[in-house]
Structure formats: structure tokens, C-alpha cells
Amino acid sequence: MNNVIIGQSGGPTAAINASVAGAYVKAKELGANKVFGMIHGIEGLLQGEFIDLDKYLSDPTNVELLKRTPASVLGTCRYKLPEASVDNSVYKQIFEILDKYNIDSFFYIGGNDSMDTIMKLSDYSSSHGYDKQFIGIPKTIDNDLPITDHCPGFGSSAKYIATSVKELIRDNQASDPRNPAIVIVEIMGRNAGWLAAAASLCTSDDCSGPDAIYLPEIPFDMDDFMNYAKELSKGHKPALIVISEGIKLADGRYVCELNGNVETDTFGHKQMSAASRVLADKLTNELGLRTRTVELSTLQRSAAHTSSLTDVKEAYQCGVQAVIAANEKKTGKMVIMKRMMENTADYPYICVYDTYDIHAIANFEKKVPVEWITDNKRGLTQSFEHYARPLICGEVMPIMSGGLPRHLIIPEAL
Ligand code: F6P
């Protein structure tokens, strides 16, 4: 292999660094002389900011540490490439850097928006006669990339969410029964409810689970929500409701927008936050109920102490498979995962890898199938559990030091 470069982009996850580790190790194994890492993704690359990963990863202990380090070790960005037909100057700049450093393979680890970058660069490369490979490595806690069965990052986030919701239910159930509260837990996921749905996984013989889970796949019915909360309060028992940050009213407005305007990023995504506050204020002001809100916020994507072993192993393998694909001269593809076994009550599960045309993936979102949502629209069916349970299984032991997990840091990215 000639030299290769790896970048991370979009929201971090607890498993994204395992993909860097997998790609680095495989590229070295296949003879790559240099494995470069972009600092803060393509935005850094355009500023000439990238490093030789040997500096940090030639020591196998650091590779192990990297697999256990949450968030994007190389730094991330949310940068949208212009259409080459409108402005090709950044493309020229990128290909000049790739040529200058003899880089033939370009790997980008990310979600829908990052796959837009792979699509545009591979299209530019092919139409300008370059012999270079552009491969996407899937990553998103939102689990909303199409074609692939699931996305690295989701399993660890889902495990953290189910664990935290279980602990929050424990806490709430211990509260004074003469003064019960309705706790509203807000979960990330944008327009897809996979992560909020994961809260249902805590339901078991030692946990009654959330009283309701509201996903963005179904228009949010405010009247039904208020009536249901009223019903719950009549029981004089503590209750816990999970909502996805992206729940929307039938008229298209996000619930989080009801308290005022929200900002938009370069890809046109609304920065969602505080839908739980909107709902809690309504319950207090209109029904006089005691409420508490919990936004898991960035904890749900940075918590590596509850990482799923399945997830971390798969993220590593996605990095490996991307390098194999590039070595086979594939380009304009994303690594995908396929589930090979039918799920049964015991959740046997085998995942195999392939690659798929990036044009069918970039900028598309995969939602929770509505058939997996219960008829009362406040819960998940067994089909969801069969899908998600294997993805949260297995534990990754952090490497501890002084009572806390140790992480690998790359000072150039700080
Ligand atoms: O795409 C992953 C994600 O974590 C979403 O779930 C969330 O809405 C968004 O990123 C938050 O983005 P930022 O970190 O830019 O606030």
C-alpha cells in the first residue's frame, strides 16, 4: 500500500477511535509506509494539519489504550464540501496535498454528513482521472445510516442510555411517595429514535422500565402526552418518561423549538436541546406536577466506561475492512455490516462485513421501523429488543490508573 490518511468527522462516539486503531493496524500490516491522521477532519487537512500516526500508535499498548478512549482522538469537524461544479478550489487543494504526500487511500469515519464528503471526493477523483481510493467508515450514535444493519457507536451509547435510565428509575422510585415527580429524560438522535428506543432495554425482572418512550418517527401528540402524564400522576407514584430530542409536532415543528429559535449547523441540522424542559414546564404550569429533567447530552456519546464490547470490536473491524477495500482498489464505498443469523429469544448474532456504493448512503437517514413501535405509540415491541440487545452485549475493561480510566491523547488535536 502507498501512504494513507484517516480522518474523523461529525459527533464523537465511545467507539470511533477503535476504527482509527483498526485502520492503522491493517494499513501497516499491508505495507503502508505512512498512515497520516487528519487533525479535526477535512477542515484541518485544508489547513495542512495532519500527523504521522506512528508517533502515537507504533506502540501496541497505545493501540489498546486508543480502543478504550472515547471521543475523536484526532479531533472532529462538521464541514460541508461545496459542490465541485460550483467551487472546485478546495478539491484542488485536497488533491494537491494527497499527491504531495503520496497518499492513495483516504478514510473518513463518520455519519451521513461525513459520507457526503466521501461521495464528493470519490466522484471528483474518478471524474479527474485520479487513481485514489475514498472509503467511508460508518460511525454514529444516532444509528441512522442506511444499508448497514447498524452503526458503530450506537451499541455503546445504547448500553449507556439503558444503564443510566435504569439507575434513574431506581433513584426516582426511592423518592418520597408523598411527593412524587415525573422525570423526563432527553436522549440524542436527531430525526431517528434508535437511541431513545434503547432506553426500553432496561426493562427486566428488576426494573419496570420507562413509563413511556416518545420517538420522532411518530408525530408527537401534546394532548395525549398531557393526558397520559395526568393519568400517571393520579397513581401518586414516581414516573419516568423518555423523549427523543427530535420529537416533532404534526405541523413539523420540533418540540424543542417551542421555547424559541434554535441554531442551525453547516449541514442545515437544527441544534436540538431542551425539549424536555418545554414539556416539564407545561406539566408544572398547566397541571401543577412536580418534574425533573435529565438531558444525557454528550455523556451518552462520551461514556466509555460502559462501552459495549460488541460495538468496540465491530468499530475496529470496520477500520480493518475499509483498508482491505482500498487495497482491493475499491472507491466511493462505505463499509457496511450485515446480520447473518435470525434472532431468537437468546439473541444469537453474527455480523459480517461488506462495502456498498456511497451514493445510496450519503445524506439518507434510516429511522426506527414504525412496526417496532407499540400501538399506544409510547413503547417498543420485542422486534426492537431482538435487534438491539446483541449490540450492547459484552464489556470493555478500561485501563485504570489512580482509580480512573486512562485515555490516549494526541496533543496536536487539543
Ligand atoms: O450526530 C450525532 C449527534 O450526537 C446527534 O445525536 C446530536 O443531535 C448531534 O450530534 C449534536 O451535535 P453537536 O455535537 O454538534 O451539538
Image: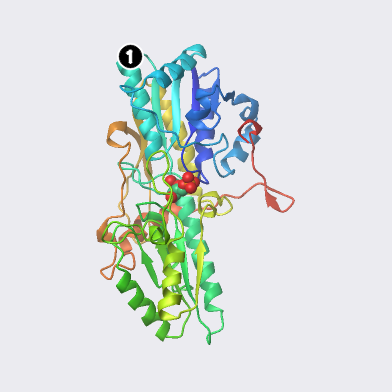
In the displayed structure, 317 sits above or below 171; it is above
Q: Residue furthest right?
A: 402
**Residue 188 coordinates in the image, percent (x, y):** 44, 54
55 or 277: nearer the viewer: 277
> Which residue matches tag 1?
128
**Residue 138 coordinates in the image, percent (x, y):** 41, 38
132 or 278: nearer the viewer: 278
Q: Residue at x 63, y 32 (%)?
A: 60
**Residue 277 coordinates in the image, percent (x, y):** 46, 65
- State left or right for residue 180 relative to residue 244: right
Colour style of the rendered protein structure:
rainbow
- State left or right for residue 93 relative to residue 62: left
Q: Note whether residue 122 is visible.
A: yes
Q: Residue at x 66, y 46 (%)?
A: 399
Q: Residue furthest front?
A: 260
Q: Report which quarter residue 202 is drawn in.
A: bottom left
**Residue 291 coordinates in the image, percent (x, y):** 49, 74
Task: Quarter of the image for the C terminus: give it.
Answer: top right
Q: Note whether residue 1 is visible.
A: no
Q: Residue at x 35, y 57 (%)?
A: 254
200 or 262: nearer the viewer: 262
In the displayed structure, 149 sits above or below 297; it is above
247 or 411: nearer the viewer: 247
Look at the numbered disc 1 and give the secondary structure of its residue.
loop
Q: Report which quarter residue 209 is drawn in.
A: bottom left
In the displayed structure, 191 sits above or below 234; it is above
Figure disc tally: 1
In the displayed structure, 404 sits above or below 122; it is below
